[in-house]
Amino acid sequence: MPMKNKYVIRSHISEKKFRDIIYLFSEDLSATQISHLTKISRLGINKYLTAVRFRIFEYCQDQSSLKGENEVDESYFGARRVRGRRGRGARGKTIVFGLLKRQGKVYTEIVPDCSATVLQKVIKGKADVGSVIHSDGWRWLF
């Protein structure tokens, strides 16, 4: 017997109906509206939408954490010279903090300042707990 739906095992809806549910979900319709359009009960629609949201959450979790060896550094972007001030003392420059997974992904974020608390929050939010952090000598207070 051919499989009716390759996305959801043991579902009683066709693959076309499931694709319609996903399309209507991406159009930001409520479960009640989707159930009226697809002629499937609201409870069934909620079951499928919960599964889709959970899969999106899992995918984002897998993509977000930087595991292994990571390098961190901050850079200043803006005018080349601001009235005789250079580097950290230059006002008006945008501070960009970045994490680089060696041989992998890069994550950047604009930060208000380079204080240890701000940078540690970014690192703890994006790097995995067991990862090794390499920096350019900035003193990290973990």
Image (spheres, grey):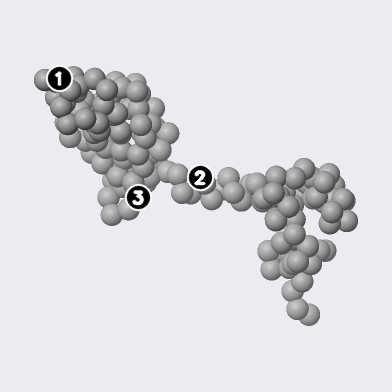
- Going from N to C along the chain, the mark reached first, 1 or 3, is 1
- Going from N to C along the chain, the mark reached first, 1 or 2, is 2
Q: Which residue type carries mark 2?
A: Gln
In the image, residue 82 above or below residue 108: above
Asked whether the viewer can see residue 132, the reply is no
Measuring from the top left, give residue 131's x and y in whole percent.
33, 41
Q: Between 129 and 40, which is closer to the camera in this rendering?
A: 40
Q: Which mark is residue 61?
A: 2
The residue lying at 31 percent from left, 40 percent from top is 99
Specify the quadrant of the image occupied by residue 113: top left
Cα–Cα gap, marks 1 and 3 = 36 Å
Quarter that holds the C terminus:
top left
Measuring from the top left, give residue 124's x and y in whole percent.
39, 32
Mark 3 secondary-structure assignment: loop
Q: Between 75 and 90, which is closer to the camera in this rendering?
A: 90
Cα–Cα gap, marks 3 and 2 = 14 Å
Mark 1 secondary-structure assignment: loop
Q: How many labels, in total?
A: 3
- Going from N to C along the chain, the mark reached first, 3 or 2, is 2
Residue farthest to the bottom?
Answer: 1
**Can you tell which of label 1 and label 2 is closer to the viewer?**
1
**Can you tell which of label 3 and label 2 is closer to the viewer?**
3
- Badge 3, how many Cα within 10 Å: few under 14, some, many 20+? some
Q: Which mark is residue 105?
A: 3
Q: Which residue type carries mark 1?
A: Arg
Mark 2 secondary-structure assignment: helix
Measuring from the top left, give residue 16's x and y in whole percent.
75, 66
The residue lying at 36 percent from left, 42 percent from top is 107
- Badge 2, how many Cα within 10 Å: few under 14, some, many 20+? few
Query: For mark 1, what is the residue?
Result: 83
140 sits left or right of 86 in the view: right
